[in-house]
Amino acid sequence: MDSKQAQGIATGAWGAKKWGGIGAAEIMLLLVAAVWGGSYAVAKQATQQLPVLEFIALRFGLTFLVLLPALRPLFGAQWRQGLAVGGLLGANLLAIFVCETFGVSLTAASNAAFLISLCVALTPFVEWWLLGQRPARRVFWAAGLSAVGAAMLSATSPADIAVGWGDGLMVVAAFLRAVMVCMTRRLAGRHAMPALTLTAVQSGVMALGAMAISLVASPPNGAWHIPPATASFWWGMAYLVLLCTVFAFFAQNHAASRSSPSRVALLMGSEPVFGALIAVYGFGERIGAWGWAGGLLIVVAAWWVTMPPPVAPRTQA
């Protein structure tokens, strides 16, 4: 299957369908948010058994191997453009993962959930800055509503929100997420690269980048660790590779080239809600009324931004 066929199938299957004003691309993004909501516990357990950078290199190295067949479209006339686009987006994604992972290790999980969700509030401004497209007024209001909801969801009270070095890294990661969405919209849409091909290139860049950073940052006599042979580690790695990376990045790349960056970011901003539901019903954690109210605000904001704009009534001549 060549790139034009793949793009046509994706567009035909996912680009035209609508359910109640919500497109299939938006539904895919909500599924991604649900999958990523369950990834925190898995990733935390895995990074306790393997250093962060080696964990990132292994995760995305395996992803690259799984997606090798998707690289066929690169062996055409536009292979240089494909590598350039995938390389640039992959480098940005690696920076996001490094900031997120180390940021979470230096701050409370509640702070991290709030600060990374600032991507929702930052994206309309980054979209305006990079793409020159001023979003609708309601997108700004919905972005602010989502940020307030994320703050309430991640803290039992306003006094629980603190600032530290880890918080700074999470703010940088949130900004880079907003840049990522806008760059994907601009670059992937311009070069019409299949979403799986773009994900494969990004994964390869991230694996190589993480290995390079690990080698530079490790002590002179440091050695790479052998991944543990436990079933829990490899089941978790399979979940992260197949669902949280292959499916999630394919869906995000596909939707970002077909939807507004602000809509993408707001839908992805529902991730803390899914994380909270999984934490409560899957891991027995408890969230108070303050947190549930914040989750409701995020859901309302995501729903609001997916509604079609009002149509002005026609005047009779």
Image: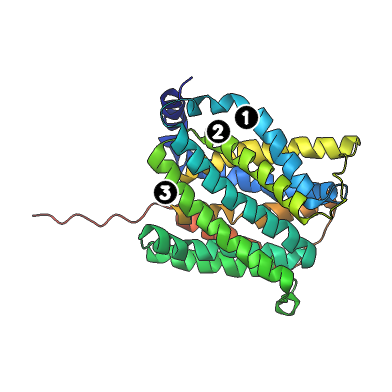
Residue under numbered circle 3: 186
Query: As drawn, is 300 to the left or to the right of 314?
Result: right
Between residue 141 and residue 45, name the one nearer to us. 45
- The residue carrying pointer 1 sits among few (fewer than 14), some (14 to 19) or many (20 or more) residues within 10 Å by Cα, namely some
Helix, strand or loop for disc 3: helix
Q: Distance of mark 3 from mark 1, alpha carbons?
A: 23 Å
Residue under numbered circle 2: 196
Query: As drawn, is 201 to the left or to the right of 281?
Result: left
Q: Are marks 2 and 1 in contact (CB under 8 Å)?
A: yes
Residue 280, x across and y down, in percent: 79, 54
Residue under numbered circle 1: 67
Helix, strand or loop for disc 1: loop
Q: Residue at x 41, y 59 (%)?
A: 130
Q: Residue at x 73, y 76 (%)?
A: 162
Res. 150 visible in picture: no
Helix, strand or loop for disc 2: helix
Identified by mark 3, the residue type is: Arg
The quarter of the image holding the C terminus is bottom left
Q: Distance of mark 2 from mark 3, alpha carbons?
A: 17 Å
Residue 295, x across and y down, in percent: 65, 61
